[in-house]
Image (tube, rainbow, N blue to C red):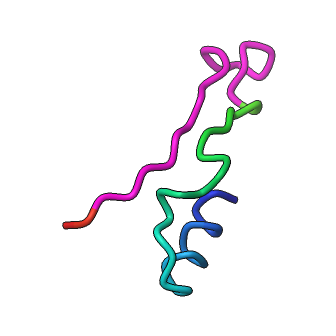
Amino acid sequence: MMVFSATEMIFAGVDPNNIRFNRTNCFDVGIECGGWGKIVLELSIEDK
């Protein structure tokens, strides 16, 4: 979802690094699902 929001912001000419909620967690990799635990993702866009 964050990738789609960042893409929309880029197309609109807005800096995607100003997205209000740039962190989320992934609930489907938890120990109960055979994963290693909960992870936190942070969106950050860098210019080449």
Q: Residue at x 72, y 20 (%)?
A: 30
What are the residue bounds of the magenta stretch?
A: 29-46
Residue in front for this viewpoint, 36 or 21: 21
Q: Quadrant of the C terminus?
A: bottom left
Q: Is the residue 8 above or below the residue 44 in the image?
A: below
For the point 60% across and 78% down, the residue is 8
* Left/right of residue 17 with respect to residue 32 in the rendered view: left
- Does the stretch in magenta take in 34? yes
Q: Is residue 37 left or right of residue 44?
A: right
Q: Nearer the viewer, residue 47 or 25?
A: 47
Does 13 appear above or below 1? below
- Is residue 28 positioned above or below 13 on the image? above
Front position in the image: 7 or 18: 18
**Above or below, comparing residue 11 to residue 18 in the picture:** below
Q: Where is residue 6 shown, x and y percent of the image?
A: 56, 67
Looking at the image, residue 34 sits to the left or right of residue 12; the answer is right
